[in-house]
Amino acid sequence: MDIPIFILAALLVHCVFLVSIFDIYFSSPLVHGMTPQQTPLPPPAKRLVLFVADGLRADSLYELNSNGTAQAPYLRGILENNGSWGISHTRVPTESRPGHVALIAGFYEDVSAVAKGWKENPVEFDSVFNESKYTWSWGSPDILPMFAKGATGDHVYTFCYTAESEDFGAQDAAKLDIWVFDHVKSFFNSSRSNQTLFSALNEEKVVLFLHLLGIDTNGHAHRPNSREYKENIKKVDEGVKEIASIIDHFYENDGKTAFILTSDHGMTDWGSHGAGHPSETLTPLIVWGAGINYPQKVTSQFFEDNFLKEWKLENLKRLDVNQADIAPLMASLIGVPFPLNSVGTLPLEYLNNSAHFKAESMFTNAVQILEQFKVKMSQKKENTLSFLFTPFKPLSESEQINFLKKIRLYIQQQKYNEAVSLCKTLINLALEGLSYYHTYDRLFLGLSIAMSFVGWTTYVILVIIKTHTNLTKTVPTNNKRSTVLFYGFAFAGMIIAFFLLIQTCPWTYYVYCLLPVPVWYAVVKEIPVIQDLATNVLSLRIGQSIGFLLVCILGIEILVFSFFYRSALTVGLLVFACWPVITQLWVQAKTRALIWTLLCVLLAIFPLMPVVGREPNIPLVIAAGLLTLLISCFSLTKKYRNNEDLKVYFYQMLSIALSTYVVSSTHDSLKNKLGLPVLNQIISWMILVSSPVLLLLSPTFLFQRLFSILLSLMSTYLLLSTGYEALFPLVLFGLMFVWINMEQEALQCYGLSLKPKLAVFDFAYAVDITQFRELHLDDVRRSFFFVFFIVTAFFGTGNIASINSFDPASVYCFLTVFSPFMMGGLLVLKVVIPFVLVSCAFEAVQVTTQLSSKSLFLIVLVISDIMALHFFFLVKDYGSWLDIGTSISHYVLVMSLTIFMMLMNGLAQLLTTQRLELPRRTKHHSM
């Protein structure tokens, strides 16, 4: 297969492997075509006020100050004297959009919505707002519009501040919440002189939604333990008190208003969210007003955590709910149909109503979830051949009728507790059934992908052996045999396609199920190579081969382990430090071996450090900038061919100096709450844009070009650093530099080739010299080093397998106004920079060790695919949300790394070999 075609095929296959996980584990759970279900009895409340304090942790609200006073005195008073309270347990991903969808629509959004930035509706869904008579909402432009756009008719009204107001560098983000409270006050004042609005406000089934973003913004900017975050909670407490008073006064204390205060997600101690840490998934829930139970005194209650004691709330009953349970609670309070896609269970203990009302509400809840189950089952039944269809037995049609009859009979006989108990059983079974049909195709899709994985890895190994080693002879092709094979596999493909067609499967199923056919056809075609290899392997030293294989397996297992425990990288680097001692390199090049050992030990410290962003340390960033300048001054001793090259070098040094200054002054300005200085912002963007240009203007001699790559990338990396990670590229680059030299020594040690002079080696003239050297066993070690360094580049400064380890403070030199895609892009750039350093060093290793970049790259592909297969089988959709989220992100990461390494291979070649030539000024001689 031609190289460009092979790379294209590899990219396509890996993209399919990556996307498959979302179809198998994270397709949208929503179904449409259900009938709305509403409690037949009159509701206790006419209106509902929903306060969502974005990013508010449960412990931040409930815990007492050191002097024993409450963080939020008004809300503390409510839960002690007037209402019910508990913890609302959110699910991964703990982001604003999925949190609000769970609260207001009652279902958990699938992860694929992240691709749409969780801003618009990726799927149509029903919500409490949609079912209400009128909804008025105030708050963030990121949240409110999605519920207005998802609503039928024109009855959901939104009032938003500008997106520019969401500034992490602003004087005080609490002004966002004050804006909301002020606008609600003026709204009620203006309604007295607006008869239409006044009448609408006095209707039943009205919802008022206040989205309070200040706490989240202050948490990102200053951390949840900061004075700003706690002050913001106080301001929210005062605002809630004032709004509740205004509303009660407006409605003349008619006792028909229900109030709910909760949060969409929490926040880690280092000011981020997105993953499944308890600080992110535990949010407060306080409910009071019409139809709500008063505080229930208890002598003892058992929870696995120790929060009750810490919060001094042991004697007040804590009523925990899942976040999606809040939607049916709101629907029940104001008497609107339960949202059609809701999977929440009505938390009856919050309701202060008759047993009859509770039983009827629970029955409505059960029927509403059962409706979804019925639609899901009929869809799956229609799309599956009758002899292949396996129904969910606990809820067959007769069982459903039985349940509904029994419950209705219990209600008629006024056996309300029995009715409620049976409703809960039915809800649990319906939810199990929904999950059963939602994951119905998972096994056969998973097997298809696993078969493709194994086939692809086998094929790549065969390609390496066939084209880059002397282990096999050239085997003449048997055309007759090839034709039979082709028709056999084509026939198998047609049968699979026919089965999928008559079951009206989505087009993606065709891709996953047909992919093993061409992959295994390519493998089976190489059977003569396998036979030839088997005879040759038997003649080799078996013990040595098995030993080498075991070392490879151990190495890959350490890499897999490092995804769970960063300290595994430290162990690996310490083993690398001993490499020269194990081989003969220590004797051959003592100084280089000593520097290699020292740098391995230095780099091994980074995985033991806390995750980046948790403890900002700007002096360390400044120190890294100054150290880079110092190293640059020493490197000036290297001779530059002409003044133009020297100018480029000085410009790069100037970029480093400017980056160091900008980081220092920006963080000082933000500390003093003066915002991001415009000049600093302009310089930051200019450095980002000019760095790659300066890099391509530098000479292509090995040392000069690699050092130029470091300076260009370092100037951008400094701007994106907040602590010790600024030193990471320097140590990593030092190790890469020594690695290139050590590989030269290793070549001589094995007597594989002559040693090229690195000082005069020019990337631009490095031709692909495969014909000079075939692959050696030691090249597997080289490839493993590369994969290990790539993983170290990724996890060295933080376990980014979790969304919550991204720190928005990293981008404050470029922007402080919330912009998810821009911030995300800059954070990805920060992650990519160490990759580029490793990839360019690997490119240098390839060309200086006289190897085709393709042969080493194929070994890298095999190593990363074996890792990916590990994670494919480790993906789970059960257990804690932290486990589920981590298992998915590990697989996505390792697949992305593989695709990324293919792209990095091309980028490294571009960065090392290409040079921009500036037009030279011609000198005019006067006569």
Image (spheres, rainbow, N blue to C red):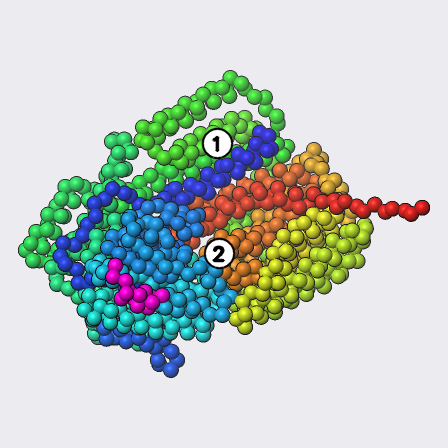
Q: Residues within 10 Å of mark 2 (few under 14, many from 20)?
A: some
Q: Which residues are magenta?
A: 183-196
In the drawing, does residue 455 fall left or right of residue 543?
left
Furthest-left residue in this view: 413
Q: Give residue 819's mark.
A: 2
Furthest-right residue in this view: 927
* Front label number (1 vs 2): 2
Which image quadrant is residue 849 in? top right
In the drawing, does residue 236 fall left or right of residue 735?
left
Residue at the location (38% across, 73% down)? 235
Q: Is residue 348 visible?
A: yes
371 vs 268, nearest the viewer? 371
In the drawing, does residue 402 fall left or right of residue 670?
left
Mark 1, residue position: 519
User: Would residue 744 be counted in the magenta stretch?
Assistant: no
Q: Give residue 43's mark.
A: none
Q: Secondary structure at mark 1?
A: helix
Which image quadrant is residue 910 in? top right
Task: Please name the predominant secondary structure of the magenta segment in the image.
Answer: helix
Q: Residues within 10 Å of mark 1 (few under 14, many from 20)?
A: many
Quadrant for the N terminus in the image? top right
| Rendered location of residue 696, percent (x, y) | 69, 47
Residue at the location (41% across, 52% down)? 119
Q: Is residue 781 above or below residue 311?
A: above
Residue at the location (64% across, 40% down)? 853
User: Would residue 187 be counted in the magenta stretch?
Assistant: yes
State which tag comes first along the sequence, 1 or 2. Answer: 1
Given the image, on which type of amino acid does mark 2 rest?
Ser
| Rendered location of residue 749, percent (x, y) | 71, 46
| Rendered location of residue 763, percent (x, y) | 72, 43
Given the image, on which type of amino acid does mark 1 rest?
Val
